[in-house]
Amino acid sequence: MCAAISRSEFLSPVSPASARWADGAGEIGVVAAEGETRLAHLYQSDPCRVLFPRPPSSGPFEAVFVTTSGGLVGGDRLRFSVAAGADSTACITSQAAEKIFRSTAATTEIDIDITAEAGATLEWMPQETIAFDGARLRRNIRINAAASARVLAGEIVVFGRIAHGENFTRGLLHDGWRIFHDGTLVWADALHLEEDIAETIAAPMNFGGATACATLLYVADDAARHLEAVRNMLNPIVEQLPAAATCIGPVLVIRLLGPDAAALRRAYSRLWSAVRAELLGLPAALPRVWES
């Protein structure tokens, strides 16, 4: 599920495209002030918008990213930035699944930059990404967490429009992660699918024919201490689908595979709810956009 990529490849500037349908950005920054988390910075440009639903009284500050174009095509570029100030608490998600449409040549590019300062608690939990057959997506996710910060980040990738009987068999999917903890690179990972994607997904040593995969990361000083608890949370899930957890330094990594994308989303939602309650001390309830 991983492939090594060079640092220069990950950090190289996005290649220019002859024409872009969309070139948008969404940025938010939050700070702790007078005992609560407040918005300190907001920037948005089409097709990106940010909504701020009223969270439950016991819930954290919430922000929801929206892509108003209804999906992304080859040549689109989106940039998202989230900064959590010292001692702030926030949950950032997306309004709906992100659809990556078929492309004849150009690549959709998404760059995500997440920063959590000392004492901050930040969740980056967008809804699933659906790669249509023939889609081309290159996404880079960079997380910078201070030594005393806690970051819970995740994603779900669906291989095709499963409900329409379509699988992701051709195109490009490159999902790169870089995690920095107290200024040091502590985890680097990339999923790269290209050329004969159907064969790669079908192979038992790769995805075993799964239609979706999910990653959940907990970045914090106490990551290793929670590994056994998280594995116990996975026990009822592994009876239904492949799932596992490990810890690499300050990064606790959880992975799930699903032969059924809808079932994987349900399992992932239950796991996230349990993890945020156990590890972050937040309510065991998800944002309303996830439950609608």
Image (cartoon, grey):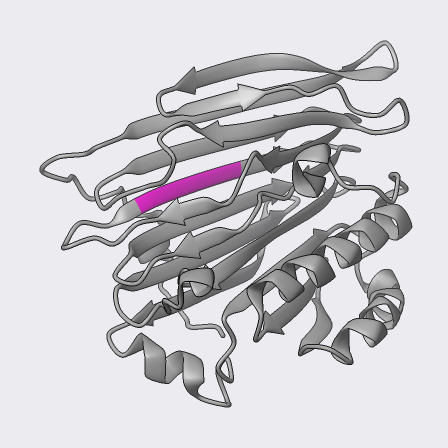
Residue 146 visible in the picture: no
Would you place residue 192 above or below residue 10 in this image? below
Q: Nearer the viewer, residue 162 or 92?
A: 162
Comparing 169 with 16, the one in front is 169
Magenta-highlighted residues? 109-113
Q: Is residue 202 left or right of residue 21?
A: right
Seen as rendered, the residue at the extreme top is: 34
Tell me where residue 157 appears, x and y as whole percent: 50, 59
Please provide percent x and percent y for residue 73.
26, 43
The residue drawn where x is 47% and y is 22% is 49
Percent x, y of residue 76: 27, 38
Main secondary structure along the magenta-highlighted residues: strand
At 41% from the left edge and 60% from the top edge, which residue is drawn?
161
Q: Quadrant of residue 19?
A: top left
Using the rendered image of the protein, determine whether residue 51 is visible from the camera's viewpoint.
Answer: yes
Residue at (88%, 71%) from the top-left corner? 232
Residue 96: horizontal and vertical position, in percent? 54, 39
Q: Is residue 187 left or right of residue 268?
A: left
